[in-house]
Image (tube, rainbow, N blue to C red):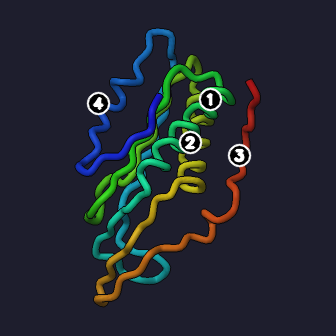
Amino acid sequence: MRFRFEATAIDTNLGRHALQDPAAGGYASFEGWVRDHNEGLAVRRLEYEAYEALALKEGDRILDEAAARFPISKALCIHRIGALAIGELAVWVGVSAVHRGEAFDACRYIIDEVKHRLPIWKKEYYENGDSGWVNCERCATAPRHAHDHVA
């Protein structure tokens, strides 16, 4: 269960394969894609930057927290850095567990915490020629988890 960055396309098949466990009956994943708009502006492309040393440690901490909160078998999160085109996969989370409910809950917990806590920044390039660093107000507040479990 590790968090990592990729500078090239994320191979979801490899990620899924790493999560296979004969004791797991459920698997859930989340894919975050680059969309073509944000706050009324047409987006042409974007770039992700990260403070990698800190983000890797905190990402691993989030995965460890998910394992402590939910009875899961394995979890993995991969986030892109660098330039991405519209439609490309920006972040992937996968979780395997004995039951599907725990896999879904842990997957949601991981992506919410990654978006809230990791030092990862997104710069959008717009069709009108402007660009800007995205400051997501939703990300500034702590995520609420509907199914908080304590193991």
Q: Which label belongs to residue 101?
A: 1
Q: Disc 2 versus disc 4: distance between alpha carbons?
A: 19 Å
Q: Are marks 3 and 2 in contact (CB under 8 Å)?
A: no
Q: Earlier in the sequence, mark 4 or mark 3?
A: 4
Indicate whether 44 appears above or below 14: below
Q: Are marks 2 and 4 in contact (CB under 8 Å)?
A: no
The amino acid at mark 4 is Leu
Q: Which residue is mark 4?
A: 14
Q: Nearer the viewer, mark 3 or mark 2?
A: 2
Q: Which residue is mark 3?
A: 145
Residue situated in front as seen by the camera: 5 or 84: 5
Considering the numbered disc 3 on the image, is that residue within a helix, a strand or a loop? loop
Q: Residue at x 74, y 31 (%)?
A: 149
Q: Which label belongs to residue 2?
A: none
Q: Position of residue 131 (x, y in %)?
A: 36, 82
Q: Nearer the viewer, mark 1 or mark 2?
A: 2
